[in-house]
Image: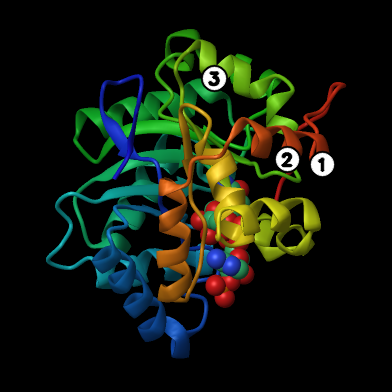
């Protein structure tokens, strides 16, 4: 599995499985745990979740699926902004760890910016690191003004900024991606398939896909993975699709492919805020 370096010197897989909408319904939890086990069997080593997903249900499903196979996995979870006070972060993390049924979260993120002063949140992140409950910390859905509000020494230590990013939504490229690149902070692209929207049926993408005997989803992922310091976390509850998505790691896009995609899905040319899902 290709890996990406974090500013801490640790590394994480460039491909992970998203788990939004998993663990939401009791009658689907067994299926969701089976999907995660199948993903691990296929070689997936990063799982992305949040206390928000299924109000803890997705973390519980992961906790069940990874029993006996935690070693070598990279777990990402996120806390609600309304839990971002110093004590709130510690308590939210401990609840997540209980649901995940493990001792450590590899990368713990603030899900989106809120109203709690960032110093409180980052002090709590340091305390969690000192006690070994998290390894790295980071943020999600942070625009440039939010990133600049992070206490200075912590700006350069962010394990990632997880943002809405796919061919049809390139807002991050306006200024956030460059800010991260200057500090070697990974960008983690969420909804990399644009939630299976019309994007996957558009001819600009399917023409390139045909050239590679690949699917549109694979090309959408390969386009993101072509860039340095990017992690993708597509979600699927179908092992066959997870296998298909993983194979995007092996697709090399040509200069012609990249130029065609760039012209069909141009980067922003004026100031724009990050989209959010
Ligand atoms: P996504 O990964 O872009 O798309 C998921 C959708 O695509 C599902 O409907 C899935 O259906 C379908 N799909 C998956 N593989 C496919 C393929 N090869 N061909 C066709 N359709 C395919 O959207 P997402 O779930 O919003 O984003 C991924 C993860 O990012 C989430 O699960 C979550 O972990 C994270 N996320 C974070 C935030 C944040 O605020 N930080 C926001 C949104 C998402 P099936 O399941 O039926 O295969």
Q: CA distance from mark 3 to mark 2?
A: 23 Å
Which is nearer the eye, 94 or 150? 150
Q: Residues within 10 Å of mark 3 (few under 14, many from 20)?
A: many
Earlier residue among tags 3 and 2: 3
Can you give x and y, in whole percent of width and height, for residue 78 in the image? Answer: 46, 47
Label 2 Cα neighbours within 10 Å, binned few <14 / some 14-19 / many ≥20: many
Q: Identify the residue shown where x is 32% and y is 25%.
A: 126
Q: Residue furthest right?
A: 270
Give the number of the mark in front: 3 or 1. Answer: 1
- Cβ at disc 3 under 8 Å from ligand 1: no
Question: Can you tell me which quadrant of the image ligand 1 is in?
Answer: bottom right
**Residue 196 horizontal/vertical position (percent):** 67, 64
Disc 2 designates what residue? 261
Q: Residue at x 21, y 28 (%)?
A: 130
**Mark 2 and mark 1 residues within 8 Å of each other at the beta carbon:** yes
Residue shown at the point (15%, 62%) measured from the top left = 69
N-terminal of the pair, mark 3 or mark 1, is: 3
| Quarter assignment of residue 128 | top left
Task: Return the residue nearer the eye: 272 or 99.
Answer: 272
Q: What crowding class fits label 1: few (fewer than 14 Cα within 10 Å), some (14-19), or many (20 or more)?
A: some
Q: Which mark is residue 180?
A: 3
Q: Residue at x 42, y 56 (%)?
A: 247
In the foreground, 84 or 188: 188
The CA span between labels 3 and 1 is 25 Å
**Contact, mark 3 vs mark 2 (Cβ under 8 Å):** no
The residue at label 2 has a CB less than 8 Å from ligand 1: no
Query: Badge 1 is on which residue?
Result: 264
On screen, residue 170 versus residue 86, left or right, reads right
| 146 over 166 or under it: above or below | above
């Amino acid at each position: 599995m290709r890996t990406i370096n974090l500013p801490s010197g640790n590394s994480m897989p460039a491909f992970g499985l998203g788990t939004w909408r998993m663990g939401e319904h009791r009658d689907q939890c067994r299926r969701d745990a089976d999907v995660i086990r199948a993903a691990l069997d296929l070689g997936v080593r990063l799982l992305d979740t949040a206390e928000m997903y299924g109000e803890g249900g997705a973390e519980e499903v992961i906790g069940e699926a990874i029993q006996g196979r935690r070693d070598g996995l990279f777990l990402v979870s996120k806390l609600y902004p309304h839990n971002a006070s110093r004590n709130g972060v510690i308590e939210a993390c401990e609840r997540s760890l209980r649901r995940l049924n493990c001792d450590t979260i590899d990368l713990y993120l603030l899900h989106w910016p809120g109203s709690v002063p960032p110093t409180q949140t980052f002090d709590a992140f340091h305390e969690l690191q000192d006690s070994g409950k998290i390894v790295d910390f980071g943020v999600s859905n942070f625009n440039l003004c939010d990133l600049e509000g992070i206490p200075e020494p912590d700006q350069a230590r962010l394990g990632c900024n997880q943002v809405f990013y796919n061919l049809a939504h390139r807002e991050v490229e306006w200024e956030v991606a460059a800010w991260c690149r200057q500090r070697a902070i990974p960008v983690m692209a969420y909804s990399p398939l644009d939630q299976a929207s019309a994007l996957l049926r558009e001819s600009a993408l399917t023409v390139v896909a045909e050239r590679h005997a690949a699917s549109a989803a694979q090309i959408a992922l390969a386009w993101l993975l072509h860039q340095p310091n990017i992690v993708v976390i597509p979600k699927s509850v179908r092992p066959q699709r997870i296998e298909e998505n993983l194979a995007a790691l092996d697709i090399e896009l040509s200069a012609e492919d990249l130029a065609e995609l760039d012209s069909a899905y141009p980067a922003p040319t004026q100031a724009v805020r990050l989209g959010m899902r």
